[in-house]
Image (cartoon, grey):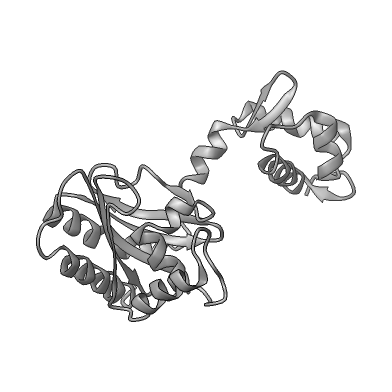
Amino acid sequence: MTTEGGGRGVLDGAFDLLETLSRAEHGAGLSELARDSGLPKATTHRLLEQLVARGAVQRHNQRYYIGRTLARLGRGWQPDPALRRASLVPCRTLARLTAAAAMVAVLDGGEMRVVAGAGTGAENSQHLSIADERVVRTAVGQVLLAAQPPHLLPPGYSWREWKRVRDRLTDHSALAIDHQDVAPGVYCFAASVSTRSGLLASISVLFSHQAPPKGTGELVARAARDVTRTLSTL
C-alpha cells in the first residue's frame, strides 16, 4: 500500500487531516494542519488538494474547512441502524393518529440525535446539544437523561428538582409531558424505548400551537412498545 509520512497509508493521512479539521471551528491553515496531524507539510498540501477536489474539504482565503460532500455523507450515519428500521412505521402511525410531528431520538455522547421521524418538522432538529438547558427541559430530554447514572446532574436543574423528574420517570412505561413548559404553544409527550445496543432512546410527539388530542399519552406509550417489540425481532 502506498504510504505517506513515516509509513502511514494515504488514507490514514487523509483521515488524520479530516479529524484535525473537524476540531477546527474556524478552519485551519496549511502549517497548522501539518503540525497537528503530524504529516510533512508537502504531504499535507497534496492530500488537502485532493480532498478539496472531491469536495471533502473546502478552501477559503488560504484556510481549510470541512467540505459539503463530507457533511452530506455524515448525515447518513446512524448510531443504531436497527432502531431506525424499527421506528419508521410506529413514527408514521403516531404522526397520522395525532396529526403532529413524531420522532425517535437517541442520546449519543453530548448530543440528542433524531434517528427517525414523520410529520411536518419532525427531523428539522437533527442534532441538539444536551448542554442547552432548553433541550434538557423538553419531555424528550427528560426521558433520555433520566436513564443516565443518578450522579449526573443536567444543566439548569437543582438536585432536588432533578430527583423529582427521575422519580417520576423510573417506570419504563412512564411519560414525560411538556405543556408549554419550554416554549409557548409547544406541547410534547415522550416515552422511553428499550434498545439492545444500550443507547438511550425515546419516542415523542410534538404539537406546535395546537392542543393535543385526547389519548395522546396512550398513543405514545403504545408506539414505544411497538418500537421495542420490533427491535426484538431484528
Where residue 122 appears, as percent x and y from the top left, is 30, 47
- The residue furthest bottom is 171
Residue in view at x 20 percent, y 55 percent: 92
The answer to whether residue 77 of the structure is visible from this angle is: no
Q: Is residue 121 left or right of residue 7?
A: left
Q: Can the viewer see residue 154 in this picture?
A: yes
On screen, residue 232 versus residue 211, left or right, reads right
Image quarter hosting the C terminus: bottom left
User: Is residue 145 found left or right of 67 in the rendered image?
Assistant: left
Horizontal and vertical percent for residue 25?
Answer: 66, 37
Please name whichever residue, 8 or 189, is drawn nearer the observer in this view of the structure.
Answer: 189
Judged from this view, the residue extending furthest toward the left is 214
When asked about the image quadrant of residue 208, the answer is top left
Which one is nearer the viewer's eye here, 4 or 155?
A: 155
Numbered marks: total: 0
Residue in the picture at 74% in, 41% down:
17
Classify 173 as above or below 144: below
Q: Quadrant of residue 167?
A: bottom left
Residue found 20% across the figure and 43% down from its top: 209
Looking at the picture, how far across and down is residue 197, in whole percent? Answer: 47, 73
Q: Residue at x 83, y 35 (%)?
A: 32
Q: Is residue 50 above or below residue 1?
A: above
Q: Quadrant of residue 56?
A: top right
Relative to residue 58, is residue 148 depicted above or below?
A: below
Q: Which is more toward the observer, 164 or 115?
A: 164
